[in-house]
Image (cartoon, rainbow, N blue to C red):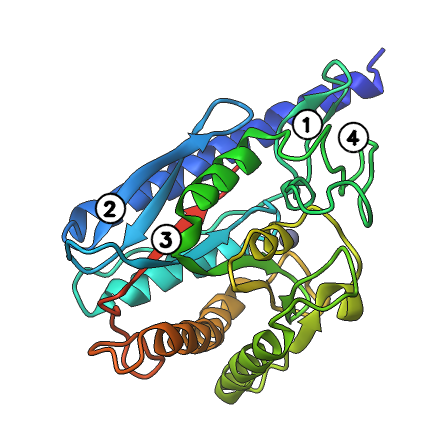
Amino acid sequence: MVTLNDIQNRVSVLYDHAFAQRQLKIYQWMTQIQKSNSELVTQHYLGKTTENRTMYYLQISQPSDKIKKIIWMDCGIHAREWISPAFCQWFVKELLRMQRSKIKESLHHIITRKNRSPHMNGTCYGTDLNRNFNSSWGSIGVSDNCSSEIFCGSGPESEPETRAVAQFIKKKKSDILCYLTIHSYGQYILTPYGSTTRPPSNNEELMHVAEMAAAALMGKYGTSYKVGPTSLILYSNSGSSRDWAHMIGIPFSYTFELRDKGTHGFVLPPDQIQPTCEETMLAVTTIIDYVDQKYFPGGAVMLTASSLGLSLCLSVVLTWTVS
Ligand SMILES: [Zn+2]
């Protein structure tokens, strides 16, 4: 007799294969990007996943011997939101386009949102990494049932993927000005916090910048995004990376929920990749421009939506959290 457990194990093997393939493709792409743009791009070790696969990040930066401020961007922390890693790859490509080489995008079909950690003696799998950060962990909008989509793990930073990101961010905290985490779907630019409706100290500025970003995005194809604190315009949740990043002192921290509003949901049709990336690019560069001008007024080279170039004072660090 085939038990539910057998089926779950079988599905889990299939998941595992799909994840390994996807990670391989993205990492092959990262290595290729690094090699063909070695003066601008470096690849670094970030940590290990639950299943002991290596996680890397890319740093894109103009050569300089001074310490730069950092824009952090992560993609694919929820695996099934496949447009998110696609956008980050697109973003890197655009950033490097003027320099050289055209890079083939890789697309992946994704099934779930959680990582691959086993629980209850391997009878269920996965923690929602965006509920696993140490920001009011476990308090609201999570589940302590490991078969739930929003299982928050056994404790704050219980997952190796969360720890790897958190350790990097903590180490570089004083240099990171902006934390962007890219998700889908719903068309939102979400500000802190998810765990409380109490506004962050710089709420007004966070909102102002997000509204400018949403306006820039809309200017391209008319796509409308809602802007505001997660807990007020979407739902309450605790343990998110965005809340955590802001709580430890990173001033500009946003979650992007990309297209669409539910017609296709996570399975966004491929013909929407290009427009989604183009419009999102305008929003992201609006935020980076603002941060750049705020911290480096009158800087010689700026990253602007109209003429993409790297600021001399900023690095962009990207990671693909592929469980
Ligand atoms: Zn997500």
Mark 4 residue type: Cys
Label 2 to label 1, Cα distance in Å? 36 Å
Looking at this view, is 130 or 293 the one in front? Answer: 293
Q: Are marks 3 and 1 in contact (CB under 8 Å)?
A: no
Image quadrant occupied by the C terminus: top right
Give the vertical position of 135 relative to 224 (above or below): above
Q: Mark 1 = which residue?
A: 11
Mark 3 residue type: Val
**Tag 3: Cα neighbours inside 10 Å, few (<14), some, or many (≥20)?**
many
Label 4 to label 3, Cα distance in Å? 31 Å
Mark 2 and mark 1 lie on one chain; the one further toward the N terminus is 1
Residue 50 appears anywhere in the view: yes
Give the vertical position of 68 relative to 287 (above or below): above
Write the residue at 61% across / 47% down: 78
Q: Secondary structure at mark 2?
A: strand
**Tag 2: Cα neighbours inside 10 Å, few (<14), some, or many (≥20)?**
some
Label 2 to label 3, Cα distance in Å? 10 Å
Mark 2 residue type: Thr
Q: Mark 3 = which residue?
A: 317
**Tag 4: Cα neighbours inside 10 Å, few (<14), some, or many (≥20)?**
many
Mark 3 and mark 1 lie on one chain; the one further toward the N terminus is 1
Q: Nearer the viewer, mark 1 or mark 4?
A: 4
Q: Mark 2 = which residue?
A: 42
| Residue 143, percent from left and from top | 82, 39
Label 3 to label 1, Cα distance in Å? 34 Å
